[in-house]
Image: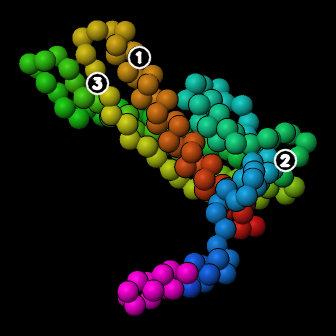
């Protein structure tokens, strides 16, 4: 019985100490992350993968050219590699590698204030059916772009939260 009282007191005291530590979640109360990302503009992209990455980054944002303080530029590299080649089944396992270098540029002076690199490796199957191959590649590209865009959005949000 005494042990239970001690455990309850310990957890109550611990919870009081944690509330006083100053910890704030990245996405805060309400839409602080959206407010931070509204300071960032991202130029239109010329290809589908770039558009998917841009859309994922802007998903929580209310960005407009008028309120922008920063511009996010990124370059991407895509490549495919064979993982498994099976002559018996006619199915090959491939990996799509998407690597993105990004820079956050302050518009007032053109200075790069934050930069980084992120990547995603996504596996997909190639078969003897052309449409299935085409759709598998599209799905892999969408998954990789979503992962990379989410990572960039999180990193930019964290950077803007600390400035």
| Residue 47 among magenta residues | no
Q: Is residue 70 visible?
A: no
Q: Judge by depth and name the residue closer to the eye, 87 or 35.
A: 35
The label number, if any, that marks residue 68 in the structure image: 2
Q: Quadrant of the C terminus?
A: bottom right
Check the image and report above or below for 133 versus 160: above
Q: Residue furthest left?
A: 88
**Which type of secondary structure does the marked residue at label 2 adopt?**
loop
- N-terminal of the pair, mark 1 or mark 2, is 2
Residue that mark 1 sits on: 135
Q: Quadrant of residue 133?
A: top left
Q: Position of residue 95 (x, y in %)?
A: 32, 34
Check the image and report above or below for 4 versus 72: below
Q: Judge by depth and name the residue closer to the eye, 30 or 46.
A: 30
Residue that mark 3 sits on: 125
Q: Position of residue 39 (x, y in %)?
A: 81, 50
Q: Judge by depth and name the residue closer to the eye, 153 or 119.
A: 153
């Amino acid at each position: 019985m005494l042990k239970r009282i001690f455990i309850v007191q310990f957890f109550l005291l611990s919870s009081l100490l944690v509330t006083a530590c100053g910890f704030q979640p990245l996405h805060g109360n309400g839409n602080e992350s959206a407010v931070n990302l509204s300071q960032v503009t991202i130029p239109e992209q010329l290809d589908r993968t770039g558009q998917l990455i841009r859309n994922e980054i802007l998903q929580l944002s209310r960005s407009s050219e008028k309120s922008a303080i920063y511009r996010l530029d990124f370059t991407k590299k895509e490549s495919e590699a064979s993982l498994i080649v099976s002559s018996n089944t006619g199915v090959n396992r491939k990996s799509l590698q998407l690597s993105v270098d990004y820079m956050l540029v302050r518009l007032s002076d053109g200075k790069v204030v934050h930069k980084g690199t992120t990547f995603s490796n996504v596996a997909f199957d190639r078969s003897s059916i052309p449409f299935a191959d085409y759709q598998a590649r599209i799905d892999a590209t969408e998954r990789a772009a979503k992962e990379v865009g989410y990572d960039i959005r999180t990193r930019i949000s964290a950077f803007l939260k600390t400035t």
